[in-house]
Image (cartoon, rainbow, N blue to C red):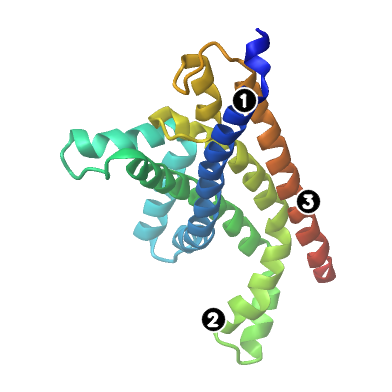
Amino acid sequence: MAAFFTSDVFRTVLSALNSGFLKTLELFCITLIGAIPLGLIISFGSMSRIPPLRWLTRTVVWIIRGTPLVLQIIALFYIPGIKKWFSWPSGEHGRMMAVCVAFVINYACYFSEIYRGGIQSVPAGQQEAGQVLGMTRRQIFFRVTLLQMIKRIVPPMSNEVITLVKDTSLARVIALQEVIWMGESFMKGNQGYAGLVWPLFFTAVYYLVFSGIATLLLNKLEKKLEFFR
């Protein structure tokens, strides 16, 4: 058992976990970069005055929000190849592409509902006042609605961002070598060691630190937006 905690073993584990964490961080950043603007676009579809577009968008959002993310990852990665529609690139690059697409679509749908609630919470009288002043719909949205919407959506968006930190672990279902996959590999002997349990539990430290930093940054953002109150 003592050999399981030598400095060489610890350095090997730490190197592997750091490598996995970089994949986790990459997935997290790509998801936010893609889902934040896509969610806004989807929210416009959900509020569209064109009934077919509105109901189609809301149906898609309902399906995505009502099914497990892990199932969406599996379906998106395997079904295109089974149906011979197209194939993801081989290796880790293909897995990363597939899981990023799944995460972006999933979180964009969740963000869209937060956006929709924030936009609809802005009093209609303020939009009418903008029209009286001769402002266009675009000007009203960016100068009146958007600024007030941001203040309202930061708390629920913060919750989703923290959830995303932990949801990245679902990527291991298609063998993406994120931090938990790397920790688990020391139990299976994939890293030259077998039966090491502590590296898997050590991954919790990465998530705690990551979540803590994200929480501090989001709290600072909320404080900066207090001038809208």
Which circle, 3 or 2, is nearer the viewer? 3
Which quadrant of the structure image shows residue 163?
top right
Nearer to us of marks 3 and 1 is 1
| Residue corresponding to mark 1 | 8
Q: Residues within 10 Å of mark 1 (few under 14, many from 20)?
A: few
**Left or right: residue 171 compared with residue 14:** left
- Asked if residue 62 can be seen in this view, the reply is yes
Amino acid type of the residue that numbered disc 2 sits on in the rendered structure = Arg
Residue at the image position 23 percent from the left and 39 percent from the top: 80
The kind of residue on which mark 1 rests is Asp
Residue 178 relative to residue 204: left or right = left
Nearest to N terminus: mark 1 or mark 2: 1
Q: Position of residue 16 (x, y in %)?
A: 54, 33
| Residue 138 circle label | 2
**What is the three-letter code of the residue carrying label 3?**
Leu
Residue in the foreground of this view, choosing between 126 and 190: 190
Query: Which residue sits at x=50%, y=28%?
Result: 181
Residue 197 as seen in the image, left or right of residue 174: right
Query: In what element is the residue under mark 1?
Result: helix
SS class of the residue under badge 2? helix
Residue 194 in the image: x percent, y percent? Answer: 51, 13
Between 52 and 91, the residue placed more toward the observer is: 91
The numbered mark, 3 or 1, whose residue comes first in the sequence reads 1
Query: Mark 3 vs mark 2: which is more N-terminal?
Result: 2
**In the rendered image, which quarter is residue 126 located in?**
bottom right
What x and y, as percent, mark residue 131?
61, 85
* Residue 216: image tag: 3
